[in-house]
Amino acid sequence: MTPRVLGILNLTPDSFSDGGRFASVAQAADAAHVMIAAGAAMVDIGGESTRPGAPFVSEAEELARVAPVIDALGGQVPFSIDTRRAAVMAYALDHGASLVNDVSALTHDPAALSLVAARGCGVVLMHMVGTPATMQVAPAYGDVVREVGDWLAERVEACVAAGIVRTNITVDPGIGFGKTLDHNLALLRGLRTLGEIAPVMLGASRKALIGKLTGAETPDRLPGSLALALHGAATGCAWVRVHDVAETVQALRVWEALRG
């Protein structure tokens, strides 16, 4: 199975690789159209940076960042909403979103779980230790694949108990979210095991682990990102969440052809 590509559209001033990239709503909307034309199945719109050490963003500010772009798209582009807040989820779902991508796995906002259940949309549950501000402070695990897997399995069952359809759930191991390089590598090697819980989304595009492995400390980490996307494909991931849509789609098409 070739994974679907989720294109990243960060509407933030401080995301590591593309913060402040879009000076206007029109530029952001155009970027979404370009990603779909390049082969993305969906565009993931986010208004809060969740990079390590990211500062707090109010609900009002987050909504002010994403709402104008969602409005500009006018339902013409398939999109998901990358948020921890129920109010932002609701706005996006009211305006055409079909998937909620929550780095807190619906634990941050008490209203999120019931909202997603009521709307019947898809949801991505990501594993994260603490908050973006604290997650990289000495993360420790005994067996990271087992512990992350157990936590995600518990969240899946909690969601099902709350009324979310099991087949609407995807899990994300949270590469770089409260993990060291060794933890990230172990999780990447264990993607098939995590896939036994639910379909997996791999979000490793331009992540710091590429720089740590290769010395590429700038945001331009395309070759490493493509290697990770192809690894996700080879280990059965359902989705790869990426910044570089056209390049990733091309790599996946060649990989798919080689498989026959």
Image (spheres, grey):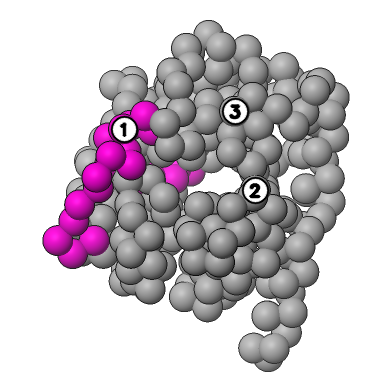
Give, as a single range, the part of the protein colored magenta.
116-144
Q: Give the percent coordinates (x, y) of residue 105.
A: 34, 39
Residue name at image x 78 percent, y 48 percent: 36
Looking at the rendered structure, the kind of residue marked 3 is: Asp
Q: Is residue 127 left or right of residue 90?
A: left
Query: What is the spatial separation of the Cα atoms under label 3 and label 1, in whole angstroms?
Result: 17 Å
Which sits in the foreground, 76 or 218? Answer: 218
Q: Give the percent coordinates (x, y) of residue 47.
A: 58, 25
Instruction: Mark 2 or mark 3: name the one nearer the start of the chain.
Output: 3
Tell me, yes or no, whether the highlighted magenta stretch contains residue 121.
Answer: yes
User: Is the residue under label 3 in contact with that under label 2 (CB below 8 Å)?
Assistant: no
Mark 3 = which residue? 14
Mark 2 = which residue? 219
Question: Compared with residue 164, is residue 180 higher up or lower down, i.e. above or below?
Answer: below
Looking at the rendered structure, the kind of residue marked 1 is: Thr
Mark 1 = which residue? 134
Q: Give the percent coordinates (x, y) of residue 151.
A: 22, 50
Which sits in the foreground, 255 or 75? Answer: 255
Q: Which quadrant of the view contains residue 215?
A: bottom right
Query: What is the spatial separation of the Cα atoms under label 2 and label 1, in whole angstroms?
Result: 22 Å
Which sits in the foreground, 115 or 16? Answer: 16
| Secondary element type, mark 2 | loop
Could you tell me if residue 154 is visible in this image?
Answer: yes
